[in-house]
Amino acid sequence: DIQMTQSPSVLSASVGDRVTLSCKASQNINKNLDWYQQKLGEAPKLLIYFTNNLQTGIPSRFSGSGSGTDYTLTISSLQPEDVATYYCYQYNSGLTFGSGTKLEIK
Amino acid sequence: EVQLVESGGGLVQPGRSMKLSCAASGFTFNNYDMAWVCQAPKKGLEWVATISYDGSSTYYRDSVKGRFTISRDNAKSTLYLQMDSLRSEDTATYYCASLGGGFDYWGQGVMVTVSS
């Protein structure tokens, strides 16, 4: 099974900061990766699909990149409403979520 | 507006069964593969099962194979998850989700607690 490792597990940043969340796969997943945002008490929401495609309605401050085993979600200017846990998800072989990165405001 | 509304959760004893439903509206249900994703209390997300748009193909995570059955009724725009031989480790919030590009729409989730 492919393992997905997200880092850091907790990230504290200031409003306006550029924030980078990482997701590393245990083997090449050929860009078959999505990013989800889950706010406290809510269902997850799709942000990015197939590595770098912004889901409809998601603010353009969110972007995704990566290839092979290493993937990144970037928030260009952190907003208070971005406080959430972020999960990567691979569907190249089996279906696996990462363990999540909890994003907090400093 | 797309809506996915789960129902059928609650408290159940170990070894017993429970059936979850997910009523879909606002999109052409029979064009989409559908899935169940779960989240144990204070834990991360786990994919549970997927069913193809026409119900002809189903897929399960190893820990639920042989115990859970995903199904759908396209005439009723409803997704189901039959859960048998429940274990304490099945305790979680269960979300239904549509599979467009990714899990593009999610229900609000339904809690299943397996305990004696």
Image (cartoon, coloured by chain):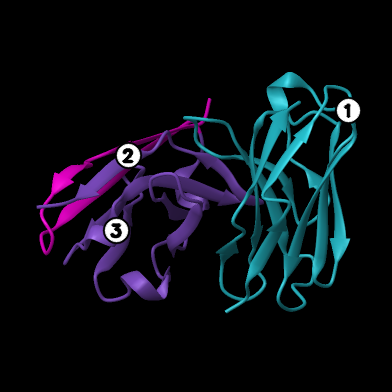
- Residue kind at label 3, given as amino acid type: Asp
Q: Is residue A27 magenta?
A: no
Q: Nearer the viewer, mark 2 or mark 3?
A: 3
Residue A64 x %, y %: 83, 49
- Residue kind at label 2, given as amino acid type: Val
> Do marks 3 and 1 both belong to one polypeptide chain?
no
The C terminus of chain A is located in which quarter? Answer: top right
Residue B53 at least partly seen: no
Mark 3 lies on a secondary structure that is helix
Please state the chain letter of the residue tagged with numbered disc 3 in the rendered image: B
Dot 1 alpha-carbon crowd within 10 angstroms: few under 14, some 14 to 19, many 20 or more: some
Residue A73 x %, y %: 80, 47
Magenta stretch, main secondary structure class: strand
Give the residue pinned by disc 3: B90
Q: Is residue B6 magenta?
A: yes
Q: Earlier in the sequence, mark 2 or mark 3?
A: 3
In the rendered picture, chain B carries what hue?
purple
Q: Where residue A77 is drawn, which disc sits there?
A: 1
In the rendered picture, chain A carries what hue?
cyan
Mark 2 lies on a secondary structure that is strand
